[in-house]
Image: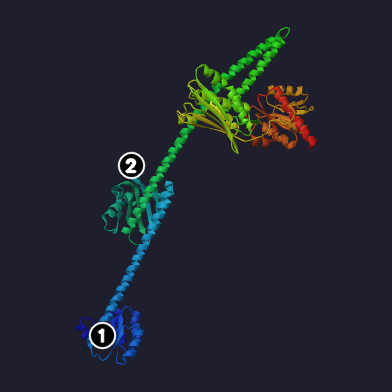
């Protein structure tokens, strides 16, 4: 009654059992328990109350010794202990109030702990989603194929939101329609045919407004009802869309991402919408980048196709120019050959034959043939198809001096007559030898000097310098002339490119071809108004393989059996006569199969074969010879520039290469040296 008067709500019980029922049925803040109870002890009831309601504070009451009872009660988690009879009710009330305050503090602390746990869970969830956003951004940044990118995006949405169904729709601006391009949990047959007009249903509304939609109540939200009534909106999703986010880039809607059917049954909330909106923003950037990449790929392919067509056009144009030049030059040469042959026939038909005039005509025909061979080599130079590397030993300083002397008439005598003063200065250093053709390298330097003279319209200086390092020899030709524009420098070595009004654009192409065949490099440095420098770099090679073996100038060889293979009747007869003059027996074969048949029947001392033949080629013949007779040498004759195709030569077993057209003296020289060298090897072996 006293506690009620003090404002407490008091429930009383006569027994421990009745007291426990109150504890079970009501939120008891403080329990006052007597030590002396009939059914169980007060201490036992204390323990049971604490088990059932840990937050309930217990004040024990005793009529015995207060000190001993208080110690025992506190050990059992009682708040305190008071003594009966109550002589000071106010003091007992204070204890009850204190116990109640502790109870309230306990409850508050429990609530705070729960709130802290909730906040920690929320923070952990936010951190997880932030990490998911970062990981997704990185992953999508590395995907360039749009189909792969869209599939990854939808998979990421489904995993992060834990949904059974997700769909990504892209907008076609030309038709104002959206189609599903990636999905999770939808039938392929349905997604293939699904088409949604902008403005229809949830997704269509999002596409039109560019704003996300979160449906918290499917049954009452009018937007869901409207969407379900639309055939196009409900045809591809069995449950209504409850979360739809626009995919935006620069305020432009690219598409919509939809989610529904969360597996755990929970509703989507603002955090889900914010997360998906952020993820959609990253996807928008990735989609735009992937589209740009595909457009660039398409543009690059179109450019490649255009380049191929242009190259093919230029190639055909170049072939036409080459054919025109070749036709012009060879028509002149053939005209000369025809005329001299007719005159030779006239002289030989006279009675008696005019021997001296005939010999003169024959000499002229030989000269015209050599000019034709030189013309072919020039064509190979400026078309870059000549690959034979000259193998003689060359002193670059001697090349410079020869070019200096060869061009003196141009830069000294001729220019002096026109009142133009040009100084050509040599600054040669001590350089090692290189492998090459001295005549061709002299042609290169001479052409560079003459080009420099043309650049010195009113006079100036030309300096020729040589030096070397451990690997290369350097030769530079520098003038103080007008210089070149960057575009001219870039195209200077292109065939047919020229800045001269009457030029054909062949000179620099020939230079480039010669330097390349010498395993060298040529670079140009120039600036308009400040002159030009051409720099040649050649490898240091003091020796190189020869076309024919070392030996005396006029080798002597014993008569030998020579298999001659050539599909040209004219060449077989011609080379056969060359061999007969050396007292060798010529065994003739018109093709590779006939040569193989002969090799199976009899042994020969030398095989001479043409390269280009129908059926088995000269390479094939050489390989067959080396398989059957390893010590029989093989000479390959070809009009192609193959002298330094060393891997192919080594593979086939060819010993020496003769270049067509080949005169009698050169042919016989190589044959004699080859036979003599093979005989010497057999004798020493």
In the rendering, which numbered label is found on residue 135?
Answer: none
Would you place residue 232 above or below residue 583 in this image? Answer: below
Where in the figure is residue 299, as x and y percent of width and height? 43, 38
Total labels drawn: 2
State the residue lying farthest toward the bottom: 64
Asked whether, in this view, residue 110 is left or right of residue 561, the answer is left
Q: Earlier in the sequence, mark 2 or mark 1?
A: 1
* Residue 655 found in image quarter: top right
Instruction: Please give the name of the residue rendered at 63% of the width and 34% of the height, measured from the top-left corner.
Output: 432
Mark 2 neighbour density, 10 Å: few (under 14) some (14–19) many (20 or more): few
Q: Nearer the viewer, mark 2 or mark 1?
A: 1
Q: Nearer the viewer, residue 330 or 455?
A: 455
Instruction: Please give the name of the residue rendered at 34% of the width and 86% of the height, measured from the top-left corner.
Output: 73
* Residue 565 found in image quarter: top right
Asked whether, in this view, residue 501 is left or right of residue 172, the answer is right
Q: Nearer the viewer, residue 441 or 433?
A: 433
Element at label 2: loop
Where in the figure is residue 32, as x and y percent of width and height? 28, 85
State the residue lying farthest toward the top: 351
Where in the figure is residue 564, as x and y percent of width and height? 72, 27
Q: Quadrant of the N terminus?
A: bottom left
State the residue lying farthest toward the left: 5
Element at label 1: loop
Disc 2 and disc 1: Cα gap in Å? 80 Å
Where in the figure is residue 168, as x and y percent of width and height? 37, 50
**Residue topped by disc 1:** 12
**Residue topped by disc 2:** 175
Q: Is residue 447 visible?
A: yes
Q: Quadrant of the C terminus?
A: top right
* Residue 328 found in image quarter: top right
Mark 1 neighbour density, 10 Å: few (under 14) some (14–19) many (20 or more): few
């Amino acid at each position: 009654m006293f506690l009620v008067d003090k404002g407490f709500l008091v429930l009383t019980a006569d027994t421990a059992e009745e007291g426990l029922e109150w504890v079970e049925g009501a939120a008891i803040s403080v329990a006052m328990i007597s030590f002396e109870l009939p059914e169980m002890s007060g201490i036992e009831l204390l323990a049971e109350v604490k088990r059932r309601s840990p937050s309930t504070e217990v004040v024990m009451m005793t009529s015995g010794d207060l000190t001993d009872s208080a110690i025992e009660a506190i050990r059992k988690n009682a708040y305190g202990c008071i003594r009966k009879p109550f002589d000071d009710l106010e003091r007992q009330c204070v204890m009850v109030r204190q116990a109640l305050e502790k109870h309230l503090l306990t409850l508050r602390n429990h609530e705070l702990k729960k709130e802290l746990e909730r906040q920690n869970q929320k923070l952990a969830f936010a951190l997880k989603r932030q990490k998911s956003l970062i990981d997704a951004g990185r992953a999508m940044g590395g995907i360039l194929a749009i189909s792969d990118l869209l599939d990854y995006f939808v998979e990421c949405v489904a995993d992060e939101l834990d949904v059974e169904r997700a769909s990504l729709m892209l907008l076609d601006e030309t038709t104002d329609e959206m189609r599903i391009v990636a999905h999770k949990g939808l039938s392929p047959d349905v997604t293939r045919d699904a088409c949604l007009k902008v403005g229809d249903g949830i997704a269509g509304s999002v596409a039109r407004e560019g704003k996300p939609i979160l449906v918290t109540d499917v049954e009452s939200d009018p937007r869901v009802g409207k969407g379900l009534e639309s055939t196009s909106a409900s045809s591809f999703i069995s449950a209504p869309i409850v979360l739809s986010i626009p995919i935006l880039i620069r305020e432009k809607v690219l598409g919509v991402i939809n989610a529904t059917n969360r597996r755990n049954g929970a509703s989507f909330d603002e955090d889900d919408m914010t997360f998906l909106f952020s993820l959609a923003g990253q996807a928008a950037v990735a989609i735009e980048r992937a589209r740009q990449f595909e457009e660039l790929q398409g543009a690059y392919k179109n450019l490649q196709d255009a380049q191929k067509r242009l190259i093919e056009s230029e190639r055909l144009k170049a072939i036409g120019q080459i054919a025109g030049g070749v036709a012009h030059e060879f028509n002149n040469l053939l005209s000369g050959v025809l005329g001299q042959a007719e005159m030779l026939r006239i002289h030989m038909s006279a009675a008696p034959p005019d021997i001296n005039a005939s010999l003169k005509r024959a000499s002229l025909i030989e000269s015209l043939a050599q000019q034709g061979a030189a013309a072919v080599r020039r064509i190979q130079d400026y078309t870059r198809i000549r690959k034979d590397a000259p193998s003689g030993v060359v002193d670059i300083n001697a090349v410079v001096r020869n070019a200096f002397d060869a061009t003196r008439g141009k830069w000294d005598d001729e220019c002096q007559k026109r009142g133009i003063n040009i100084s050509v200065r040599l600054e040669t250093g001590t350089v090692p030898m290189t492998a090459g053709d001295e005549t061709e390298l002299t042609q290169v330097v001479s052409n560079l000097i003459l080009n420099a003279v043309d650049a010195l319209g009113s006079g100036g200086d030309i300096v020729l310098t040589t030096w070397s390092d451990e690997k290369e020899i350097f030769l530079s030709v520098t003038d103080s002339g007008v210089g070149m524009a960057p575009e001219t420098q870039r195209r200077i070595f292109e065939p047919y490119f020229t800045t001269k009004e009457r030029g054909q654009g062949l000179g620099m192409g020939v230079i480039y071809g010669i330097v390349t065949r010498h395993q060298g490099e040529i670079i140009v440095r120039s600036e308009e108004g400040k002159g030009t420098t051409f720099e040649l770099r050649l490898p240091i090679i003091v020796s190189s393989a020869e076309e024919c073996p070392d030996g005396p100038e006029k080798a002597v060889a014993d008569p030998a059996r020579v298999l001659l293979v050539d599909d040209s009747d004219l060449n077989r007869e011609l080379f056969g006569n060359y061999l007969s003059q050396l007292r060798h027996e010529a065994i003739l074969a018109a093709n590779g199969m006939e040569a193989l048949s002969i090799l199976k029947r009899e042994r020969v001392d030398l095989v001479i074969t043409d390269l280009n033949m129908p059926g088995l080629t000269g390479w094939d013949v050489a390989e067959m010879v080396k398989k059957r007779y390893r010590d029989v040498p093989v000479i390959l004759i070809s009009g192609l520039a193959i002298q330094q195709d060393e891997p192919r030569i080594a593979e086939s077993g060819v010993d020496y290469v003769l270049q067509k057209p080949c005169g009698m003296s050169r042919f016989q020289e190589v044959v004699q040296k080859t036979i003599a060298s093979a005989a010497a090897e057999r004798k020493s072996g």
